[in-house]
Image: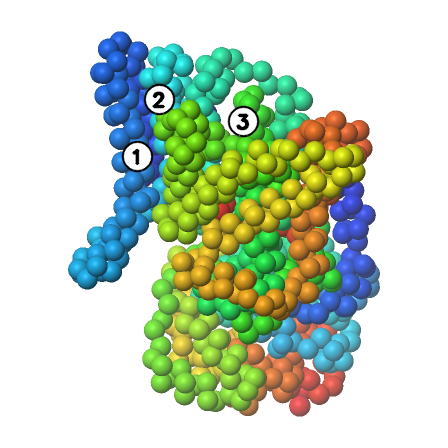
């Protein structure tokens, strides 16, 4: 009992406070794990909560939202709104459902969810992300209800890690602690050509998935040639991810988690804006484009149930190859235009005057 | 309820093998009943043979059939005949080596009239399937463990507290120490690795600590969980790396197996009663089969043979060593330290045989080890190696000093709390979640 009390005291004193984490995460080399970016996002949300006089908007989504939305451009274009971004690679519907509570707690007036059929068609993966303590354990129960008892049993190890990562800060931020220098006490460097280097931690295996699409090798290579290094290699890897997008038992769960996130925001009085995320035109060869219909059904539900605003890509001039860095992510030019789309959607939804600056295409 | 929990625990791995567990249980229960009803010596021998044959047949089929078939095929190939091996695609049931030995010991003890057979089938079934020790021991003896099941248990706060500490310490040893050391060992002992002599040396020391923390960690968890429920499982490890000789080591390492082999193999073979040379033969055979018990591979057989030879040599030379009488307390301490260091390195050397993935790797690594010394990356591995082994060595030094395997429970509450908190934080920050399975599950 004394041991547990001591751990909780240490946890409360050292790990519950945001500021030390902000300072620490800035010093720690970036690794593409969500822990880092959640720590950053928490800092932004704290700043948002500190200025309640301004209407505020939070942009949530995967790395496509992380790269595609440029907060500095948004702040310049629409300074009347306080902006925050909560976007990183592993932010899938389950994580969106788990983290919307953060945006609500920060007093956001609008939440922009950047999403497309790609996100709901991807396999369900579970990563112990740093959620908001017990507040969102509800998301976990919802996931177990949607997945069923068999799913819960098969993924029991991950499912216990998720609440643990939320309840204990030391565990939640352990990757940051490890990367901050503690790792040298437990890892054995193997940067040697004569030793077998252990495989780097990859994204977790799918907890629920459908069948992968088969893509012939020639098509694969031809598409990879569209990109220059380093994006060539990245795009090959992303093509593999795109082939995972397809119908299966995971989709119903992903859809419902997205609906649930929307309902939660709506119940808290937050405006919900769904912005369709663009994909490279060549991506269509690697995944099931028929899933867009399913995605539009989910959006229709959100519009009906949550009074959500939807910005489909058909409402914009199509994003062309020159606006992409790789198969999934926009380049600087594309991101500037996409930020303009988001800014315009927020402006309209919050009923704020016409935007300024170069980022908003509708003003020209 | 504990029986249902135990079968549910086993079914969580693979429900199909619950049947195998049940077969072993039913056979030995009825062998025990039959032995109770039979007085004629010759018939009793036949009855106990049923238990031995059934249990060894289960073990042999699931664990050794493929190995013997391949080895026979290789032998025939070497003699010029082509005999394709019979390929059996069977899964090795987890814990099979442990529970078959446990049930056999019941039948043999009843046969030897050391215990009275139980009439309560469900209690006997729990003795075989008791979940904390089902998959990786300790291999409990019926004389010690059955009475605990048959009689009401005494659960106290003290037992719950000390049991919880054992669970925490075992988990720490497994998830923090063993699983982090695994990265070093796996990197050096990968089939295509080409390490230097220094790297093999450090990785082998690392493996000694890894397997010890892994296996004794499991035992601690099993003992802790059992203690919380009012059971007292036997001590399976008694500071083996502080042994002063190979003989002493086998009194401290995997005690439940070494005493099992002593009582049911070494002594029936004649033990040390049949003269010097037969004693050596018995020692060697016991260790050879002990090696084979660990796995169906020639590296394990060779490892057992190494220990067999080591025990024979120790027996041969111990009268000479016993004559050495240190002249002062300091010299005595130094002599003790020297013996501990020598024994540890001897044991670690044997682990090169144990850990090698094939005979080809073993011969290659021995060639490198006995060649010129090359440090390779050892300099960069010292810090994590020391950091990971230090908590264990620190606590074990206290255990040796106080001659108490659980000194923590005697410390003041605040100190205990700090140790528990350190272990919990260590687990949370350094623990390898979703790490490796326990090494001894494969045996």
Q: Is residue A345 above or below residue B259?
A: below
Indicate which disc, 2 or 3, sits on the residue closer to the N terminus: 2
- Label of residue B234 in the image: 3
> In the picture, residue A27 is in which quadrant?
bottom right
Q: Is residue B180 visible?
A: yes
> In the picture, residue A67 is in which quadrant?
bottom right
Percent across and percent down for residue B134 are: 44, 33
Q: Is residue B432 visible?
A: no
- Quarter in which the N terminus of chain B is drawn: top left
Looking at this view, is B269 or B95 the one in front?
Answer: B269
State whether discs 1 and 2 lie on one chain.
yes
From the image, tell me which residue sits under label 2: B108
- Quarter in which the C terminus of chain B is drawn: top left
Indicate which disc, 1 or 2, sits on the residue closer to the N terminus: 1
Colour pattern of the rendering:
rainbow
Percent across and percent down for residue B72 are: 24, 52
Q: What residue appears at the point 63 percent right and 19 percent down from the top-left corner? A: B156
Q: What residue appears at the point 38 percent right and 19 percent down from the top-left corner? A: B109
From the image, tell me which residue sits under label 1: B56
């Amino acid at each position: 009992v004394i041991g547990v009390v001591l751990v909780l005291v240490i946890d409360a004193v050292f790990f519950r406070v945001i500021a030390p984490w902000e300072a620490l995460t800035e010093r720690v080399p970036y690794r593409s794990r969500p822990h880092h970016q959640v720590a950053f996002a928490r800092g932004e949300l704290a700043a948002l909560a500190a200025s309640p006089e301004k209407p505020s908007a939070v942009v949530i989504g995967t790395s496509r939202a992380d790269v595609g939305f440029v907060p500095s451009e948004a702040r310049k274009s629409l300074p009347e709104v306080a902006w925050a971004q909560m976007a990183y690679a592993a932010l899938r519907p389950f994580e969106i459902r788990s983290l919307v509570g953060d945006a609500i707690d920060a007093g956001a007036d609008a939440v922009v969810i950047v999403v497309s059929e790609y996100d709901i068609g991807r396999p369900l993966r579970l990563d112990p992300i740093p959620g908001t303590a017990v507040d969102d354990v509800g998301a976990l129960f919802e996931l177990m209800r949607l997945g069923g008892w068999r799913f819960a049993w098969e993924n029991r190890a991950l499912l216990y890690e998720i609440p643990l990562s939320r309840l204990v800060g030391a565990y939640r931020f352990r990757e940051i602690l490890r990367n901050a220098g503690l790792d040298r006490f437990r890892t054995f460097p193997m940067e040697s050509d004569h030793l077998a280097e252990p495989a780097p931690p990859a994204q977790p295996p799918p907890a629920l998935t459908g069948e992968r699409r088969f893509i012939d090798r020639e098509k694969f290579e031809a598409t990879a040639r569209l990109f220059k290094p380093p994006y060539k290699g990245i795009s090959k890897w992303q093509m593999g991810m795109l082939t995972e997008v397809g119908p299966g038992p995971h989709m119903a769960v992903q859809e419902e988690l997205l609906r649930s996130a929307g309902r939660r925001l709506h119940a808290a009085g937050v405006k919900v804006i769904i912005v369709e995320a663009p994909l490279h035109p060549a991506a269509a060869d690697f995944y099931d484009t028929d899933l867009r219909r399913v995605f539009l059904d989910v959006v229709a539900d959100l519009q009906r149930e949550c009074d959500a605003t939807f910005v489909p890509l058909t409402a914009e001039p199509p994003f062309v190859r020159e606006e992409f860095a790789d198969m999934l992510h926009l380049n600087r030019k594309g991101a500037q235009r996409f930020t303009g789309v988001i800014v315009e959607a927020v402006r309209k939804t919050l009923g704020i005057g016409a935007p300024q600056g170069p980022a908003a295409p509708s003003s020209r | 309820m504990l029986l249902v929990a135990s079968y549910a625990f086993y079914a969580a791995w693979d429900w199909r093998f619950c049947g195998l567990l049940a077969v072993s249980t039913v056979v030995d229960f009825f062998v025990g009943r039959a032995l109770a009803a039979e007085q004629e010596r010759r018939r009793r021998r036949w009855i106990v043979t049923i238990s031995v044959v059934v249990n060894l047949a289960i073990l042999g089929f699931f664990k050794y059939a493929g190995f013997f078939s391949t080895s026979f095929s290789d032998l025939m190939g070497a003699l010029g005949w082509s005999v394709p091996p019979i390929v059996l695609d069977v899964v090795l049931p987890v814990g099979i080596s442990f529970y078959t030995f446990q049930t056999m010991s019941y039948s043999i003890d009843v046969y030897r009239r050391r215990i009275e057979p139980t009439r309560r089938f469900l209690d006997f079934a729990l003795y075989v399937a008791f979940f904390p020790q089902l998959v990786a021991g300790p291999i409990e003896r019926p004389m010690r463990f059955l009475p605990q099941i048959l009689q009401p248990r005494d659960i106290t706060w003290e037992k719950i507290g000390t049991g919880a500490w054992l669970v925490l310490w075992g988990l720490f040893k497994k998830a923090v120490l063993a699983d982090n050391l695994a990265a070093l060992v796996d990197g050096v002992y990968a089939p295509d690795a080409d390490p230097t002599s220094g790297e093999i040396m450090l990785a082998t020391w690392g493996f000694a600590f890894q397997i010890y923390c892994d296996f004794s960690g499991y035992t601690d968890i099993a003992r802790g969980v059992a203690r919380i429920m009012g059971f007292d499982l036997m001590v399976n490890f008694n500071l083996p790396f502080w042994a002063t000789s190979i003989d002493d080591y086998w009194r401290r390492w995997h005690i439940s197996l070494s005493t099992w082999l002593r009582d049911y193999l070494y002594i029936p073979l004649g033990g040390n009663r049949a003269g010097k040379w037969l004693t050596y033969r018995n020692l060697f055979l016991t260790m050879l089969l002990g090696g084979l018990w660990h796995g169906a591979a020639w590296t394990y057989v060779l490892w057992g043979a190494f220990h067999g030879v080591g025990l024979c040599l120790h027996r041969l030379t111990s009268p000479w060593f016993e004559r050495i009488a240190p002249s002062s307390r300091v010299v005595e301490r130094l002599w003790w330290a020297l013996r501990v260091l020598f024994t540890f390195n001897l044991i670690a050397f044997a682990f090169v045989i144990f850990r090698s993935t094939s005979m080809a790797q073993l011969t290659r690594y021995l060639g490198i080890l006995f060649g010129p010394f090359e440090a390779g990356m050892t300099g960069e591995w010292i810090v994590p190696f020391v950091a990971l082994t230090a908590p264990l060595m620190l606590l074990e030094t206290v255990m040796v000093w106080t001659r108490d395997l659980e000194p923590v429970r005697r410390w003041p509450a605040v100190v205990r709390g700090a140790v528990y908190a350190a272990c919990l934080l260590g687990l949370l920050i350094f623990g390898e979640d979703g790490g490796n399975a326990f090494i001894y599950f494969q045996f």
